[in-house]
Image (spheres, rainbow, N blue to C red):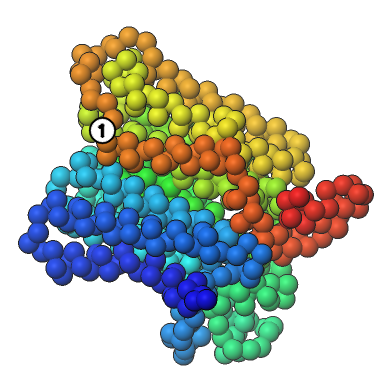
Amino acid sequence: MFDWAHTIPILSIVCYLPLVGAVAILAFLRGSSASTVRRFATGVAGLDFLVSLPLWWAFQRDGELFQFRESAGWIEAIGARYEFGVDGIALLLVLLTTFLGFLAFLSSWSAIQEREREYYIFLLLLQTGMLGVFMSLDFFLFYVFWEVMLVPMYFLIGIWGGPRKLYAAIKFFLYTLVGSVLMLLGILALYFFNGDGLLAWPGLGGDATFSVLRFHEIASQIPPDLQFWIFLAFFVGFAIKVPMIPFHTWLPDAHVEAPTAGSVILAGVLLKMGTYGFVRFSLPILPEATRELLPWMIGLSIGGILYGALVAMAQKDVKKLVAYSSVSHLGFVMLGIFALNPAGLNGGILQMINHGLSTGALFLLVGILYERRHTRLISEFGGLSKVMPAYATVFLIITMASIGLPTLNGFIGEFTILVGVFERSWVWAALAAFGIVLGAAYMLWMYQRVFFGPVRHEENQGLRDLNGRELACVLPLVVLCFWIGLYPKPFFEILEQPVEYIVQRVDPGYAEALAAARPGELPAVVAGSGE
């Protein structure tokens, strides 16, 4: 039987197919109409999603940790290799990227009316950059993709954004660049620690390498003081991308000014790069520093949950309200990750996916309304459920998913996070639960003002309801929200092995300590089996 999963370089195909599409538009569609470019780019994004789907079925839940491995020599003089591979965490994020990417292209058909050729080229390049970040198992390669995806997003905001687009684009670029430079210093510190050159850190010998898995192996031999400084360097780079407070101020501006597709990708995928960085690099490579700085990380996470919710409640712009809700929701993700136990990590990682689906859908819906009214002020609406019933129904479902209503995806993620956090501290769990109450307050208050009551403005009387293309954009997200909310088992199964691996590396005494504290109880759950 032909083993395509280990014979065909499927990860490279998925990663570079959008790049090939961008080159094709640049080289062969110069004189083509905007409609042709639009359809071609959307077709490439759709094909990329279809090509990535078999990864879900071919991934062996009980197989090797990192699968579909691709490796080749690259810059051998410095030890950099072309190394691709995905575990269950990266696999879910790759599928989320290709799925939301396709919907972002489809949503742009009526929203973008100028310089469409360049717009779709940048969107395709951004897709390749994001996929490369999640697939890379070499630090040098990871950093290249991390920087590459910064450029197209800068242009997407700066050219096709709102009235303050240049300010938002430059702010986004500078924030991310500062974090990237500090992250690079952390990568170089690890590199020289492992190497045997003149600048090697006193410690291990061996060949210089940027291999992520090599650093996983030597994590216990990295001195605690070095771990501390590398953790701080990584923290700034990843915290800006999450974003955690106080590094969050670029996010509302970027979201509000970005075009709809830019906001969808920014919320759905780009923010997950920061949380993914903590899970993939900070926790398994720097375990002692992680445990030492745990109270600070928990404090910032809970602060983000409460601050984001309170500021969202005060917003007059629907899009800015959803943007600040991301600060609160990503605080939940970080809280679950830094619970450092299987339940917290499972919930945090699943909530990364949940946030991408529900908040991505909210930005799509806000974009649809903005195309019709060219305003996002809550005060300009009211009674929309009477004139746009289908739109109001979908918006209600996604709102309920966002606030964590049972049977929808947000509930599963938040509940699992709270279980993990409660194991660490009931005070942390209580504060986080209060954030859920605040989240329900601002989302429901916004929905009530926009959709209920009389139609107060004449401009809203004749608003068109969702058309076929718009339904095709939002209904798949609704289906996935219900799927995860009603049957999350496949997602937890695919996360089981990588979560167990991370817990064992960041806190190897956790399982033994919990077993001693609760003799005879939950040994399988602690070990990550989920039974």
Q: Position of residue 209 (x, y in %)?
A: 55, 82
In terms of depth relative to the viewer, which is nearer, 246 or 354? 354
- Which element is circle 1 on? loop
Q: Position of residue 155 (x, y in %)?
A: 26, 55
Residue at (27% x, 39% y) in the render: 469
Q: Is residue 262 left or right of residue 407?
A: left
Asked if 140 appears above or below 425 in the picture, the reply is below
Residue at (43% x, 41% y) in the render: 477
Q: Position of residue 358 (x, y in %)?
A: 46, 39
Residue 101 appears in the rendering: yes
Q: Which residue matches tag 1?
A: 467
Asked if 108 appears above or below 381 in the picture, the reply is below
| Residue type, label 1 | Asn
Residue furthest front as drawn:
1
In terms of depth relative to the viewer, which is nearer, 407 or 147? 407
Q: Is residue 371 left or right of residue 179?
A: left
